[in-house]
Image (cartoon, helix red, strand yellow):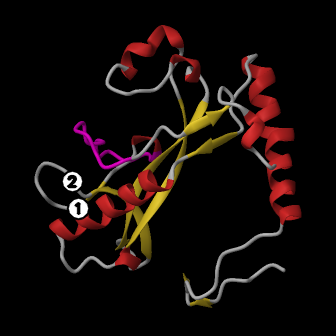
Amino acid sequence: METKPILEGDVETLSLPNTMSNVFIQELINNYRNNQLKAINSTLEMTDADSIWFDLPKLKKFINDLETEAKKVNPATSESDLGIRFYYAAYPKIDNWTIMESHTVPKEYAERHTLIMVPTLKKEDKNGKILHYDFNPSNSNGQVIAMALKSRNTTDPIEEEGGLAQNHGSLIPPDSPIVQNY
């Protein structure tokens, strides 16, 4: 039985567990594998990953860091003000692997897709609409600043210093698909 989340405005309450039927999960995964993954693999002539796994302590730490760092900047920041955006990303080609020197990512991950998690903060835009902006709660000047994305045709630069983000779960492949149910 599929449990439907209860919605209050645009906020989902957490009183019921989030569930999906196995048939629905399998259908969406098959859609990805039969379309996007197939196109990636044939176009790039490679075998890209079809899943990524993060351990629970890593996820909890990232969420805790997000909450802690945001509250350092603005103690009034509430849980409902924060979120996480998942960006689709890809590791560099092996001949550009020097960019990975400070990361413990195996070379077998070269060119495969990954996810990067970036904190978001609810803010009102110039028209009064509430939006979930990417932000870096731990920037050098101690202010919560929406990160401008050049790809979105803004003139504001992306911060050069590091920001709170999470990457590197285990990709399948190259890890073994024996653990997957779908």
Residue beneath disc 2: 138
Crowd tier of the residue under label 2, counting other residues whose Cα lies within 10 Å: few below 14, some 14–19, many 20 or above? many
Residue beneath disc 1: 69
Compared with 180, 132 (above or below) is: below
Compared with 82, 8 (above or below) is: below
**Please, what is the three-letter code of the amino acid marked with disc 2?**
Ser
Judge by depth and name the residue closer to the eye, 50 or 43: 50
Q: Main secondary structure of the magenta part?
A: loop
**Please, what is the three-letter code of the amino acid marked with disc 1?**
Glu
Compared with 31, 92 (above or below) is: above
What's the CA distance linking mark 1 and mark 2?
6 Å
Q: Residue 69: x percent and y percent?
A: 23, 61
Judge by depth and name the residue closer to the eye, 114 or 103: 103
The residue under the point 61% across, 27% down is 112
Magenta part of the chain: 152-165
Judged from the image, the secondary structure of the residue bearing numbered disc 1 is helix
Judge by depth and name the residue closer to the eye, 37 or 101: 101
